[in-house]
């Protein structure tokens, strides 16, 4: 299986964005996972969306100059998961979240990405779970329709703290939203002690993939201490016909103690590992 490997620009938040892109290109990656994370990434919606065409066009040139492709544009509308969640009970907040998503589609098209990721929404404690889930399904169905109209693949990342914190909930959500795919990251499930076998049914629903080291109790760890069998995952990808990018996604933040590994060295180790499997 020949991989299209990507590296997240938000792996290196202490570098200026141009330098992060230079580093990713120097490491030989095919693509970049672009973070549009309000309040905590190089590219923030509140700035980039002032003039979507201009800012995305500038980014497209930067990528082309370095021989890189936009593997994914990942929208996170706020620093927290709740205030602008896609399924927020407040209609005005949902409207703002929709507007940001539409801008993201325009931004992705203008910078050359055919893939957009976002968060699926959360469970709101003051209402039945079914209400939060139903609203999330409605909002994500609308996003799938909007993305399809621009020939963009849309996915969500089932994650810690979301409406889909475990594989069964993720599968239930996928079943309610035709066309919805996953940006699949085993580490969110590994961290809470789930086995690879429990996560594996999600692979066939993935259109994008995040990889890094993890183990029970640690969302992010080193290559050496990793407990996920990525060799097995690659075999499952082959059997399910996976065609997306494989993004190596180390982050550097105090959240979940994700600032305790050497992102550069770990990224190189995982790059070499996946390249060693490309002929299998």
Image: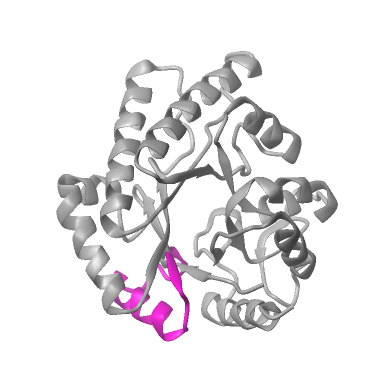
Instruction: Please give the count of numbered marks on the rendered protein.
Output: 0
Which quarter of the figure has residue 9?
A: bottom left
224 sits to left or right of 129? right
Could you say where residue 241 lies in the image, as x and y percent from the top left?
67, 57
- Counting from the top left corner in percent of width and height, residue 48 is at 23, 51
Q: Position of residue 99 (x, y in %)?
A: 29, 32
Residue found 57% across the figure and 62% down from its top? 258
Is residue 13 located in the magenta-colored stretch of the structure? yes
Placement of 278 over or under 237, stated as above or below: below
Residue shown at 64% from the left, 30% from the top: 173
Which quadrant, please, contains the N terminus? bottom right
Relative to 34, does residue 29 appear above or below in the rendering?
below
Kindly tell me whether residue 228 is visible in this rendering.
no
Relative to residue 42, is residue 174 depicted above or below? above
Q: Is residue 275 left or right of residue 101?
A: right
| Rendered-image quadrant of the C terminus | bottom right
Q: Nearer the viewer, residue 216 or 101?
A: 101
Tell me if 101 is positioned left or right of 279 in this view.
left
Q: Nearer the viewer, residue 146 or 119?
A: 146
Q: Which residues are magenta?
A: 10-32
Q: Quadrant of residue 162?
A: top right
Q: Can residue 183 be seen here?
A: yes
Q: Residue furthest bottom?
A: 26
Pick the front one: 52 or 132? 52
Residue at 64 percent across and 58 percent down: it is 242
Q: Is residue 29 magenta?
A: yes
- Colour scheme of the picture: one colour
Q: Position of residue 244 (x, y in %)?
A: 55, 59
Location of residue 130 (image quadrant): top right
Residue at (30, 70) in percent of width and height: 17
């Amino acid at each position: 299986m020949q991989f299209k490997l990507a590296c997240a620009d938000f792996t290196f938040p202490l570098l200026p964005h141009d330098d992060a892109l230079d580093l990713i290109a120097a490491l030989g990656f095919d693509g970049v996972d672009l973070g549009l994370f309000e309040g905590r990434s190089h590219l923030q919606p509140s700035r980039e969306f002032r003039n979507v065409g201009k800012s995305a066009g500038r980014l497209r040139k930067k990528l082309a100059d370095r021989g890189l492709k936009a593997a994914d544009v990942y929208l996170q509308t706020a620093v927290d998961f709740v205030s602008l969640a896609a399924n927020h009970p407040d209609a005005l907040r949902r409207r703002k979240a929709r507007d940001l998503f539409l801008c993201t589609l325009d931004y992705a098209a203008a910078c050359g990405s055919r893939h957009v990721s976002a968060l699926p929404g959360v469970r709101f404690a003051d209402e039945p779970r079914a209400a939060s889930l139903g609203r999330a399904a409605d909002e994500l169905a609308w996003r799938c329709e909007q993305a399809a109209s621009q020939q963009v693949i849309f996915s969500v990342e089932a994650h810690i703290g979301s409406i889909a914190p475990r594989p069964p909930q993720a599968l239930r959500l996928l079943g309610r939203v035709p066309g919805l795919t996953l940006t699949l990251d085993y580490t969110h499930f590994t961290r809470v002690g789930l086995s690879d076998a429990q996560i594996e049914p999600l692979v066939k629903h993935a259109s994008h993939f995040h990889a890094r080291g993890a183990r029970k109790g640690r969302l992010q760890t080193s290559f050496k201490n990793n407990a996920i069998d990525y060799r097995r995952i690659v075999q499952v990808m082959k059997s399910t016909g996976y065609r997306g990018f494989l993004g190596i996604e180390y982050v550097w933040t105090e959240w979940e103690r994700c600032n305790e590994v050497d992102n550069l060295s770990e990224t190189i180790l995982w790059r070499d590992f996946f390249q060693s499997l490309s002929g299998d």
